[in-house]
Image: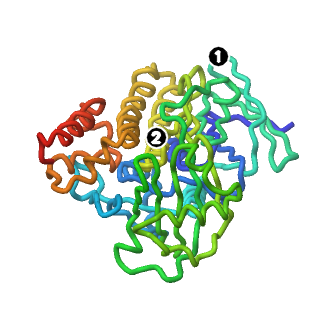
């Protein structure tokens, strides 16, 4: 059996793993990557947030992404019957990037992986992790490549960026009850041959069917568009068991987008993901750290998945560098508590979206500029900025303002 040695083993070649690899390579830290799939491969999580741009830049990946000409995302639009809530990232509270991208992940992830390989980091594709043995902080990982070649990788530290594969979460029994539960999703792509010009064919839009149910439209620069529904598990029981038939039935419930997508064939059978949220009991331990969806996933409503993936990937890589250099690292304070601070903010927003409180703020007829700017900063991913009242007071501010709206005590 072939044996390899490396300082850092990264499991997963998605955005989280590639940001980690990019940073480590820039810092001269030896790493290698194992990825279960072959690329390009489909993945969900197609809408990025401006906060991620900082992480791509620090990892040395930004210019390679820019060169691909992906659809730029300058904000987001929410529609509910005749009500409109639109957010422009250039009109947010505080500093930071004013735009990002919406991307077909098969193409996007391939760009990142190709750039990392160009920089000299080895990626083993079709490489499935079978077992990981830890001795203190050292690890020995058994990997099978192309279903036949077995290798062992000895590493000083493992960054698990395996996403929905959740390699270490499964092996170490770290799975926990999710913070947001009871929601499912179904999605597909179409080739939009008669796409409208301007905003209608460029802007990511969420059409809200009811407080618990919403639809996404994400147009890509290649002419394809992503369509999907999210709701409580029970909502899906009212449709056909055949995903294609069910999706066509769901499209009939749209009002703003009524009939717009009916004539387009699906590029693939709609995929249904039940109980989409994930969580773990801890995101680090002796010799390892979990990043991105391998640790936690909340809900797709605010596109936080890739934002947390890149933030945690970069953060873990920085701390791992210090760890292998023999320096003291406070993983609890500088990783777990840091990440949890941002996750808690988005958790509050997701929960208050489904209570309807946040929707009252989004669709208010006369929005107050400062409140919209502060909310916009959160939607852009700047959930660690405690100068923003909607970050600092996230656990109560949305509900408080919603109740004031109900009592007509405030004009936001």
Q: Nearer the viewer, residue 412 or 129?
A: 412
Left-right relation of 196 to 166:
left
Indicate which disc residue 322 carries: none
Q: Which residue, as the protein is rendered here, is positioned at the far top?
A: 136
In this view, the residue in front, 282 or 97, is: 282
Q: What residue would you read off at disc 2?
A: 314
Separation of disc 2 and disc 1 at Cα?
Answer: 24 Å
Q: Which residue is disc 1 drawn over?
A: 136
Q: Position of residue 351 (x, y in %)?
A: 40, 37
Q: Quadrant of residue 250?
A: bottom right
Of mark 2 and mark 1, the one earlier in the sequence is 1
Name above or below for residue 379 compared with residue 159. Answer: below
State which quadrant residue 109 falls in: bottom right
The quadrant of the image that shows the N terminus is top right
**6 versus 304 height, above or below:** above
Q: Position of residue 369 (x, y in %)?
A: 14, 52
Q: Is residue 75 left or right of residue 184?
A: left
Percent x, y of residue 388 = 21, 39
* Residue for point 78% across, 38% down: 143
User: Of residues 336 and 144, which is closer to you in this image?
Assistant: 336
Above/below status of 275 relative to 185:
above
Residue in the image at 69% along x and 18% along y: 135
> Is residue 182 visible to the viewer in this orientation of the structure?
yes
């Amino acid at each position: 059996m072939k044996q390899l040695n490396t300082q850092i083993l990264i499991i997963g070649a998605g955005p989280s793993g590639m940001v980690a690899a990019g940073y480590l390579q820039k810092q001269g830290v030896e790493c290698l990557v194992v990825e279960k799939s072959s690329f390009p491969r489909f993945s969900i999580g197609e809408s990025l947030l401006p906060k991620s741009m900082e992480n791509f830049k620090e990892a040395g990946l930004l210019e390679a992404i820019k060169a691909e000409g992906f659809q730029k995302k300058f904000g987001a639009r929410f529609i509910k019957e005749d009500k409109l809530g639109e957010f422009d990232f250039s009109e947010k509270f505080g500093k930071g990037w004013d735009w990002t991208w919406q991307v077909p992940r098969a193409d996007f992830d391939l760009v990142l992986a190709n750039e990392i390989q160009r920089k000299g980091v080895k990626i083993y594709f079709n490489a499935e992790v079978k077992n990981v043995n830890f001795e203190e902080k050292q690890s020995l990982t058994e990997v099978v490549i192309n279903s036949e070649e077995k290798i062992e990788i000895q590493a000083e530290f493992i960054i698990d960026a395996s996403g929905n594969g959740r390699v270490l979460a499964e092996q170490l029994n770290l799975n926990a009850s999710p913070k947001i539960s009871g929601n499912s999703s179904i999605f597909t792509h179409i080739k939009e041959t008669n796409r409208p010009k301007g905003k209608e064919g460029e802007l990511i839009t969420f059409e809200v069917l009811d407080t618990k149910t919403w639809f996404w439209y994400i147009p890509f620069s290649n002419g394809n568009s992503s369509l999907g529904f999210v709701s409580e598990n029970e909502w899906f029981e009212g449709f056909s068991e055949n995903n294609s038939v069910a999706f066509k039935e769901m499209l009939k419930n749209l009002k703003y987008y009524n009939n717009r997508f009916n004539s387009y064939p699906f590029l693939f059978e709609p995929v249904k993901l039940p109980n989409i949220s994930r969580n773990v009991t801890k995101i680090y331990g002796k010799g390892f750290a979990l990043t991105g969806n391998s640790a936690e996933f909340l809900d797709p409503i605010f596109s936080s998945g890739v934002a947390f993936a890149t933030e945690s990937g970069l953060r873990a890589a920085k701390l791992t560098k210090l760890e292998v250099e023999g320096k003291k690292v406070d993983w609890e304070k500088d990783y777990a508590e840091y990440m949890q601070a941002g996750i808690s903010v988005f958790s509050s927003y997701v929960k208050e979206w489904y209570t309807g409180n946040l929707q009252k703020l989004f669709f208010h007829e006369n929005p107050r500029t400062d409140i919209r700017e502060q909310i916009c900063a959160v939607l852009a991913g700047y959930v660690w900025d405690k100068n923003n009242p909607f970050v600092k007071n996230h656990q109560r501010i949305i509900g408080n303002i919603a109740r004031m709206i109900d009592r007509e005590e405030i004009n936001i």
